[in-house]
Image (spheres, grey):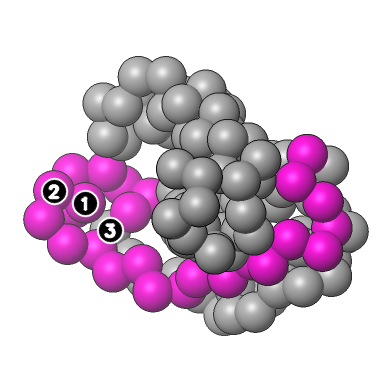
């Protein structure tokens, strides 16, 4: 890992709750994802992408943005992504059957500011 990258592009989709297992059957997602983010930080600069999911800002977006600010730092470059589209099996999960609302997008931006993130884009 060391010496081969200037910037590490990392992703978050879920927070530390049960969404990962319920939606994507991804056990240990939070532990693996946060460990990888910390490892990348040891070796270079970060750009972290956070995909905002419908109805999941309290369980996923908020704790993720707070973790980034508290653990990686408020100056970490963050791309808050509103590109979610209900595709494939998303229609089987009630809250994922729709696109994000304007309110949810605004809420995600407020959460980033409240978390102390100073270097984010949407």
Residue 80 image position (x, y, % from top left): 58, 69
Mark 3 or 2: in front is: 2
Residue at point 42% right, 19% down? 28
Disc 1 to disc 2, C-alpha distance: 4 Å
Label 1: how many Cα within 10 Å (few below 14, some 14–19, many 20+): some
Q: Which of 18 and 74 is in front in this view?
A: 74
Query: Which of the marked residues, 3 or 2, is nearer the chain's N terminus?
Result: 2
Q: Which residue lies furthest to the front in this view?
A: 3
SS under mark 2: helix
Label 2: how many Cα within 10 Å (few below 14, some 14–19, many 20+): few
Q: Give the range drawn in magenta.
A: 71-96
- On screen, 59 above or below 107? above
Residue 15 image position (x, y, % from top left): 55, 37
**Is 51 part of what is drawn in magenta?**
no
Residue at image mark 3: 97
Residue at point 31% right, 47% down? 94
Asked if the residues shown at circle 3 and circle 1 are in contact, with their CB atoms under 8 angstroms apart, the answer is yes
Residue at image mark 1: 90
Relative placement, left or right, of 68 versus 96 is right
Q: Nearer the viewer, residue 80 or 102?
A: 80
């Amino acid at each position: 890992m060391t010496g081969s990258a200037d910037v590490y592009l990392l992703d978050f989709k879920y927070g530390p709750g049960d969404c990962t297992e319920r939606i994507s059957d991804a056990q240990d997602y939070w532990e693996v994802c946060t460990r990888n983010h910390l490892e990348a930080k040891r070796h270079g600069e970060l750009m972290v992408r956070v995909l905002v999911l419908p109805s999941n800002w309290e369980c996923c977006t908020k704790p993720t943005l707070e973790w980034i600010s508290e653990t990686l730092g408020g100056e970490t470059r963050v791309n808050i992504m509103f590109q979610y589209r209900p595709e494939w099996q998303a229609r089987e999960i009630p809250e994922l059957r729709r696109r994000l609302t304007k309110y949810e997008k605004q809420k995600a931006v407020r959460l980033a500011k409240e978390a102390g993130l100073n270097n984010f884009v949407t």
